[in-house]
């Protein structure tokens, strides 16, 4: 099977990824102790469960596999998916930049088992800062919606059931692992809904078209 090369329009979308990564790790290095703690009473009612590290970690292949599938198989879904992530992640990073935040929910000790060891290892690079709104939530919801709306995937019932179950499991994992407050999850979900409306109604696509056109004119000069 021949793998098609990304279009110019898709390269424009992919160009945001290094910007996000640099921005994210810069904030992670800067915001360490001087932050506003995010907390609500619901957080105290949710027990810590280290086994939620499994769906929590599945976020990474979930996002990456979805992106590659859309890139090579469904141009429309790829554009919607990437626009959703770019806008959602940009807003999250902007909020964290002007409103340094974090959470103090992590337990002092852990049980001695396989899952707990992964949790401790994960927390070495996944800090307790830059949590509001939750990018884990934004990414999972945008991926789930893109899979649900994809013309090539929407009729695959088993896949769609698994898709939404995994999305819900990832959202639950953020609070059961004490990686996020319920406020992070709620704000991330609300932000995702707003972003999805903007993207799937075509507003973001029109802006992308203007950027593509402007770049084309610049190259032609």
Image: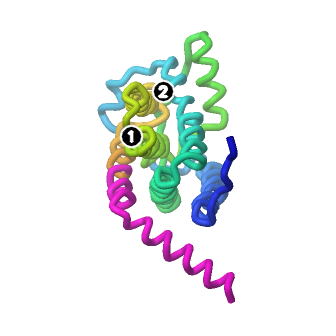
In the image, 189 versus 116, the foreground residue is: 189
Earlier-in-chain disc, 2 versus 1: 1
Looking at the image, residue 195 sits to the left or right of residue 14; the answer is left
Label 1's element?
A: helix
Is 185 located above or below residue 18 in the figure?
above
Q: Which mark is residue 177?
A: 2
Q: Does the magenta segment cover residue 1? A: no
Inspect this view and state whether residue 21 appears.
yes
Task: Give the image location of residue 115, x and y in percent.
Answer: 58, 16
| Pointers 2 and 1 in contact (C-beta within 8 Å) | no
Query: Mark 1 = which residue?
Result: 148
Q: Residue furthest bottom?
A: 221
Which region is colored magenta?
192-221
- Spatial CA span between label 2 and label 1: 27 Å
Label 2's element?
A: loop
> Residue sitting at 43 percent across and 71 percent down?
206
């Amino acid at each position: 099977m021949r793998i098609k090369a990304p279009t110019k329009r898709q390269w424009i979308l992919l160009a945001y990824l290094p910007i996000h990564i640099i921005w994210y790790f810069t904030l992670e290095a800067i915001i360490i102790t001087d932050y506003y703690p995010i907390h609500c009473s619901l957080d105290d009612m949710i027990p810590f469960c280290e086994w939620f590290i499994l769906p929590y970690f599945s976020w990474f292949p979930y996002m990456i596999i979805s992106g590659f599938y859309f890139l090579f198989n469904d141009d429309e879904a790829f554009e919607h998916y990437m626009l959703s992530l770019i806008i959602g992640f940009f807003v999250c990073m902007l909020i964290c930049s002007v409103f340094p935040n974090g959470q103090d929910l992590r337990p002092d000790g852990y049980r001695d088992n396989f899952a707990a060891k992964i949790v401790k290892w994960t927390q070495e690079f996944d800090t307790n800062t830059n949590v509001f709104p939750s990018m884990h939530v934004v990414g999972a919801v945008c991926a789930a919606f893109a899979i649900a709306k994809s013309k090539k995937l929407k009729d695959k019932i088993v896949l769609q059931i698994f898709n939404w179950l995994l999305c819900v499991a990832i959202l639950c994992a953020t609070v059961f692992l004490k990686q996020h407050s319920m406020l992070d999850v709620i704000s991330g979900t609300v932000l995702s809904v707003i972003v999805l409306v903007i993207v799937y109604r075509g507003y973001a696509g029109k802006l992308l078209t203007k950027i593509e056109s402007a770049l084309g004119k610049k190259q032609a000069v």
